[in-house]
Image: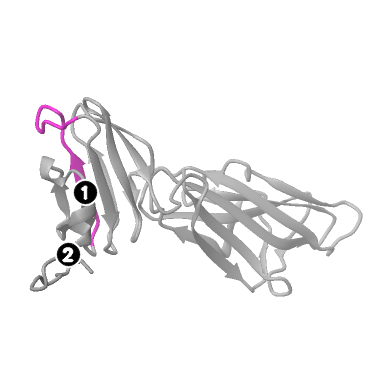
Amino acid sequence: MAYPFAAAEVLTAVDLNAMIGAPTQNAQTGTTYTFGLADAGKVNTFDNASPVTATLPAQATVSWPANTVLPVLCLGAGTVTITAAAGVTINGTPLTLATSKGGSLVRTASNVWTFTPTGGGGGGKVLQVVRATDVTDRSTASTSFVDATGMTVTITPTSATSSILLFSSFNGATNTNGYFRCQITTSDNVAVSGAEEQTGGFSSSANKDFPFVLMGYASPATTSAVTYKVRFKIASATNGIMRNASLTGQLFAIEVAA
């Protein structure tokens, strides 16, 4: 039988990555980085406990070839924010990446790029849920909105383009015939869209529980911590009560990717 190699030949291991052209990594551990021509086609990884800023320079600074692709991956606890140098446009979201999130920057024209997320990081994905609970009855005799102590939640968005969905539920009552009103606001008392005010009526019976469910929508446009809270007041009554001791009051903040 004839063999395709001489008897003295030895088969050696080969680098399959090299054979198929698999990308190598450009590992970065600092807090700032500017992409260069040598980064094209590599997986540009960023690993730092603090936030990282990665800048995409203009065509006048780097002679980017047509259809250049810059894969990006966040490995550290610090978020990676991709920024455009003067004169550069980056389309697509999110441009702030949390741990284990990534995507690719694709050059579509001179000084115009598009970011495409990978790993299911597209729009509509729930990124995090924060919940606050309160098991203490709260009361007020105020006809102006006051904070419902314990019904406050703080969330730190992972992307400035994310939206925040807010949900709150609890039972309310008045000790005389009248009305109980509530809302969800920001920390500076600005009512959240969709949760400006809900009213429960008790015109026929006092001390009767009324279920409240509030739903709001916010676009904080930041990656800094933001706080939301429930506020309540009375109208045509002498006292309003949140019955959190019998049915846990709760406030949810849900971050949704753009």
The reply, left or right, for residue 212 in relation to residue 147 is: right
Residue 164 image offset from top left, x and y in percent: 51, 49
Residue 77 shows in the view:
yes
Residue at 62 percent across and 55 percent down: it is 167
* Residue extending farthest front: 1
Magenta segment includes 188: no
Depth check, front residue: 2 or 167: 2
Query: Is 121 situated left or right of 79 in this image?
Result: right
Q: Amino acid at mark 2?
A: Val
Q: Nearer the viewer, residue 14 or 248?
A: 14
Q: Which residues are magenta?
A: 50-65
- Which tag is nearer the camera, tag 2 or tag 1? 2
Residue 57 forms part of the magenta stretch? yes
The secondary structure type at the circle numbered 1 is strand
Magenta part mainly helix, strand or loop? loop
Q: In the image, which disc is placed on residue 53?
A: 1
Residue 130: where, in percent of width, then height?
A: 51, 63
Left or right, 18 with respect to 95, comes to left
Q: Nearer the viewer, residue 228 or 62?
A: 62
User: Which residue is disc 2 drawn over?
Assistant: 14
| Residue at (73, 74) in percent of width and height | 246
Mark 2 surroundings within 10 Å by alpha-carbon count, few (fewer than 14), some (14 through 19), many (20 or more): few
Q: Is residue 22 visible?
A: no
- Secondary structure beneath disc 2? loop
Residue 140 picture location, percent across and down? 66, 60
* Residue in the image at 48% along x and 44% along y: 123
Q: Is residue 135 above or below residue 153?
A: below
Q: CA distance from mark 2 to mark 1?
A: 37 Å
Give the mark nearer the N terminus: 2 vs 1: 2
Please say if 98 is above or below 107: below
| Quarter of the figure that contains the N terminus | bottom left
Of the residues shown, which amino acid type is indicated by label 1? Thr
